[in-house]
Amino acid sequence: MLTDIALRALKADAKPFKKADSGGLFVLVQPNGKKHWRFTYRFGGKQKLLSGGAYPFVSLAEARNWRDEAKRSLFAGQDPSEIRKAAKRQAAATSTNSFKSVANAWLESRKLVWSQRYARIVRTRLEEDIFPDLGHVNIGAIEPPALLATLRKIENRGSVEMAHRVRNHCGEVFRFGLAESKCTRDPSRDISAAMAQPAPVRHRAKVEAKDLSSFFTKMHADEGEQLTHLALRWTILTMVRTQETRFARWDEIEGRGTPEVMWRIPADRMKMRSEHLVPLPPQGADLLDAIEKANVFRGAGNSHLGQFLFPVAYSKSGVISENRMLDIMYRIGLRGKATVHGFRGLASTVLNETGLFEPDWIEAQLAHITTGVRGAYNSAIYLPHRRNMLAWWGKFLEDAGFNPAVQTGL
C-alpha cells in the first residue's frame, strides 16, 4: 500500500508508470512528474478505468474514500462511470438553467429596448445583490423564502426602494424563464407583502414657476463656465434629461437656419431606446448660435471633441460631467431645493395647467412611453402640436428672463 512519503518520493521516468495502492486504486506518474489517481474495476464483464484527480490536490485518504464510494456503487449494481456522466449532465443542465444564465439571456433580450446606460445599471444590480446568493441556483428551485432573504440584505442597508426595484428585475427574469420553460413559477409575486415598504414617492425638487424670474436673474449672475451655463439652458428649454444634453452632437441637429430646426436624438442615447425628436423653438436656434460660439473645439476643427455641443477635453467621456449643471444650482442657493431634472416636472406642470395642450403631447415631448394605445410610440408622434407647444414654452421662459445671449464667467 502507498504512503504519503512514498508518493512524494516517486520520480518521473521517460514513460508513464503505475504504483498500486489497494482495491484497484493506483497512481499514474507522468513523464512531467504529475501524479494522477486512477481506479480500475470490472462491470458487465468489461475492464473499466475511472480517473480521480491529481495528487497532492486529492490526498491519499481522499482517493481511498473515492475508491470506496465507487465500490459501493458497484455492489449496488451501478457503474461508477455512468453515475459520473449523469452527474455531469445534471451539472450542465443546472448551469444552463441557473438564475444567472436565465438572467443573462433576459438582459440580452432587452438590448433593443433599453439604453446601454440603463442596461448596465440593471446588470450591476443583479451582479451585486442577487448573483452572489442565487446566481448559481437552478431558477426552478428558487423558493420565495430564499429570494426574500436575499432582498432583505438590500433592505438592511437602508435601501428599501432599491430592494423593490431589484425584486421587479427578478420578477421579469422569472417570467422570462417561464416563457422559456426554465421554471414553472415566479416566486417574486409571493413576497411583496413580506418586504419593507418604501416611503411615499417624492418627486424631484424643482424651481416653481413663480420663482423662475428670480432663478434666471441669479443664474445669469453666476460666474461659472460659459458652456456649462449653456448646457443648463439647453436642458431647461428642450425638456430633456441631463444625459441627453451631455452627449448632444452637432450631426443630430437638422434644418438649422430654417423654421423647422430639429434635434433628432438617436434611440441608443434614449432611456427607452426610442428615437426622440425635439422641435426647437426660436430660442433654441439662438441658443445653438451661442453654443457654437463658445465651443472652441468646433471652432478649431477638432473632429473628436468638436462633434459634441458640450465637450470637455479632460473628461473621460469627452463631454461635461453629470454634476456640472447641478453645481450651478448649488452655487445659486438651490442645494436640496431643486434639481436639474426638476425642470422636466416644471415644464409638465406649467404646460398641463395652461389647458392649451393635450397631456399626450406633453408626455410624448418628455419621451414618456406609456402602455395601451398611447404606447404606440414613434418619434414623430404629435410633432406639429409639439412644435407649437415648445414655441409657447420658449416664450414662457423668455418672459421669465431666459436669455441665451447673456454672457457669464468664462
Image (cartoon, rainbow, N blue to C red):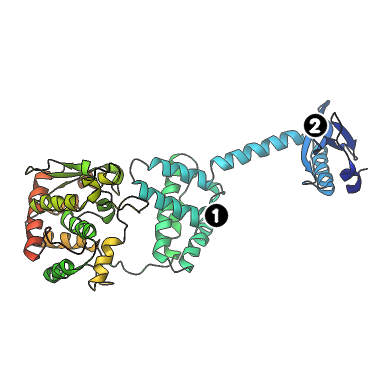
Q: On the image, which quarter does residue 283 sit in?
A: bottom left
Could you tell me which residue is drawn at 24 percent across and 67 percent down?
329
x, y percentage for residue 115? Answer: 33, 46
Q: What residue type is labelled 2?
A: Leu
Q: Earlier in the sequence, mark 1 or mark 2?
A: 2
Residue that lies at the very extreme toward the top in this rendered image? 45
x, y percentage for residue 50? Answer: 78, 34
Quadrant where the C terminus is found in the figure:
bottom left
Residue that lies at the very extreme toward the right in this rendered image? 1
Could you tell me which residue is drawn at 43 percent across and 67 percent down?
196
The disc at residue 49 is: 2
Q: What residue type is labelled 1?
A: Pro
Q: Can residue 377 be seen in this view?
A: no
Q: Can residue 75 be seen in this view?
A: yes
Tell me the mark number nearer the camera, choosing from 1 and 2: 1
x, y percentage for residue 134? Answer: 54, 53
Q: Mark 1 points at which residue?
A: 132
Looking at the picture, tell me which residue is in the foreground, 286 or 208. 286
Could you tell me which residue is drawn at 11 percent across and 44 percent down?
261
